Amino acid sequence: MSAYKIIEVVGTSAKSWEAATEAAVASASGSLRNLRIAEVVKMDATVGKKGKIKEYRVRVALSFKYEA
């Protein structure tokens, strides 16, 4: 039997929500081992001048195997 922990991280990108998700997972994988699931919980964007999207942001729930 296994146990998993879930944390939330935020990723950002000037390109897309997909790139923001990849940034969040890549950043977290630097300090977390055995990542299992990445679930996008929330997506939003900051809007700049002339109504253009300035930055895409995602909140990602990550699960990883818990090792006591």
Image (spheres, helix red, strand yellow):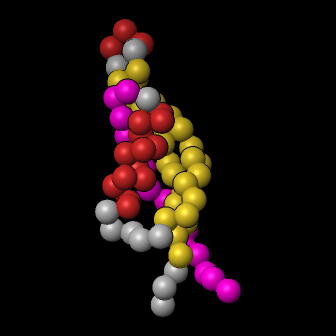
Q: Quadrant of residue 13?
A: top left
State the image coordinates of residue 18 (x, y, percent, origin top left): 48, 35
Task: Residue at 38% x, 61% y: name it.
Answer: 29
Foreground residue among 2 and 57:
2
Prevailing secondary structure class for the magenta stretch in the rendered image: strand
Judge whether residue 7 is colored magenta: yes
Residue at horizontal 41%, vertical 71%?
33
Above or below for 50 versus 25: above
* Side of 36 relative to 53 (left or right): right
Picture layout, residue 56 above or below residue 11: above
Count of numbered labels shown in the rendering: 0
> Taking 66 as reference, is 32 left or right?
left
Question: Does residue 4 show up magenta in the picture?
Answer: yes
Left or right: residue 62 compared with residue 54: right
- Image position, residue 10 (x, y; %): 42, 50
Can the viewer see residue 11 in this picture? Answer: no
As drawn, the residue found furthest toward the top would be: 50
Q: Quadrant of residue 37?
A: bottom right
Q: Residue 32's x, y, as percent?
A: 39, 69
Against 21, is 3 above or below?
A: below
Residue stretch rendered in magenta on the structure: 1-15
For the point 52% across and 80% down, the residue is 66
Q: Residue furthest right?
A: 1
Tell me if residue 25 can be seen: yes
Q: Position of residue 60 (x, y in %)?
A: 51, 52
- Image quarter (top left, top right, bottom left or bottom right) of the N terminus: bottom right
Seen at 53% across and 38% down, the residue is 43
Q: Nearer the viewer, residue 3 or 54?
A: 3
